[in-house]
Image (spheres, rainbow, N blue to C red):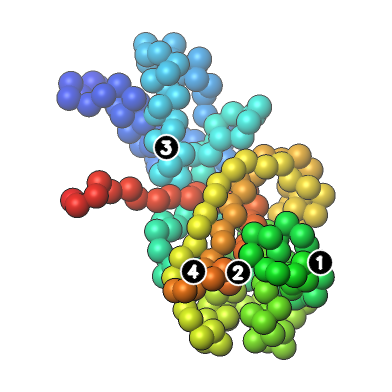
Amino acid sequence: MDYKVRETEPAYAQLARQLREAVEAGRYSDGTRLPTEAELAEEHGVSRQTVRRAFQDLVADGIVYRVPGRGTFANESGRRYRRQLGSIEDLLALSADTVMQIVSPLRRGVDIDAASRLRLDTDVLYTAVFKRLHDGIPFVLTTVHLPEHVAAHVLDSPELQAGASSRNTMIGLLEPHLDSPIVEAAQSITVALATEQVATELNCEVGHPLLRVDRLYSNDDGVPTELSVSYFLPEHYTYRVTLRRAGL
């Protein structure tokens, strides 16, 4: 591996480049753990903060993934799903290269919190649970809540029956039936630990760190249409968004 310094390249970028080249060359493959921050800092004569910044760039690019308490690992080929999400169209495009597998079909029930977030005047709604797979590997478990009048359009859809697998998204199934299209998804991202159900469906341990993404979808009248709560495995999924300055 070439460790020659590029004078105009920041130390963290140089280290990130060298580690990226090492991973791509097969030095770290098949989920191999990379050296620790302390080991790399000593080897390259840089601070641990520099190593940490280099790791952050590699994680963002899907080159490595970090498991709290275990270390940093080279991303196994084909195991991590990465897609840039910046629009409703990007979310719909998930149907192109992932599979939606129904765990629990749409069922009528009561959920006070979900009903409140959907701004319903009743606590009754419909809920479904599904996981999404890429190359046969489950990387996210999603619970979807729908107002009763919205769920009525897809209750009999074969794609939403127990055990069904298809290349669809929930909003893709709903939109042909809606009077007003979905134009907005208000999103929040937090960290959560795997419950027993999530661990079973995503093949991880109970308490495993996960990325939780909540999305509230609304139509062009500003009326909420769908609430989804998703739990992503960080070692199998990279979330990336491009931010631009206004007016440029």
The span from disc 4 to disc 3 (Cα, nearest Å) is 38 Å
The span from disc 3 to disc 1 (Cα, nearest Å) is 43 Å
> In this picture, is 93 found above or below 113?
below
The span from disc 2 to disc 1 (Cα, nearest Å) is 15 Å
Q: Is residue 200 visible?
A: no
The structure residue drawn at horizontal position 36% and vertical position 31%, both measured from the top left corner, is 16
Lower position in the chain sequence, tag 4 or tag 1: 1
Name the residue type under label 2: Glu
The span from disc 2 to disc 4 (Cα, nearest Å) is 12 Å
Q: Which residue is mark 3?
A: 58
Lower position in the chain sequence, tag 3 or tag 1: 3
> In this picture, is 34 found above or below 174?
above
| Helix, strand or loop status at disc 3 | helix
The structure residue drawn at horizontal position 45% and vertical position 16%, both measured from the top left corner, is 48
Q: Which residue is mark 4?
A: 222
Name the residue type under label 3: Leu
Quarter of the N terminus within the rendering: top left
Q: Which is more foreground, mark 4 or mark 1?
A: 4
Q: How many residues crowd around disc 3 within 10 Å: few (fewer than 14), some, or many (20 or more)?
A: many
Q: Which numbered circle lies on residue 226?
A: 2
Task: Tell me the quarter of the picture where residue 124 sits.
Answer: bottom right
The span from disc 3 to disc 2 (Cα, nearest Å) is 34 Å
Name the residue type under label 4: Gly
Q: Which residue is mark 1?
A: 110
| Helix, strand or loop status at disc 1 | strand
The structure residue drawn at horizontal position 80% and vertical position 54%, both measured from the top left corner, is 197
Task: Tell me the quarter of the picture where residue 153 sits.
Answer: bottom right
Lower position in the chain sequence, tag 3 or tag 2: 3
Q: Which is more foreground, mark 4 or mark 3?
A: 4
Name the residue type under label 1: Val
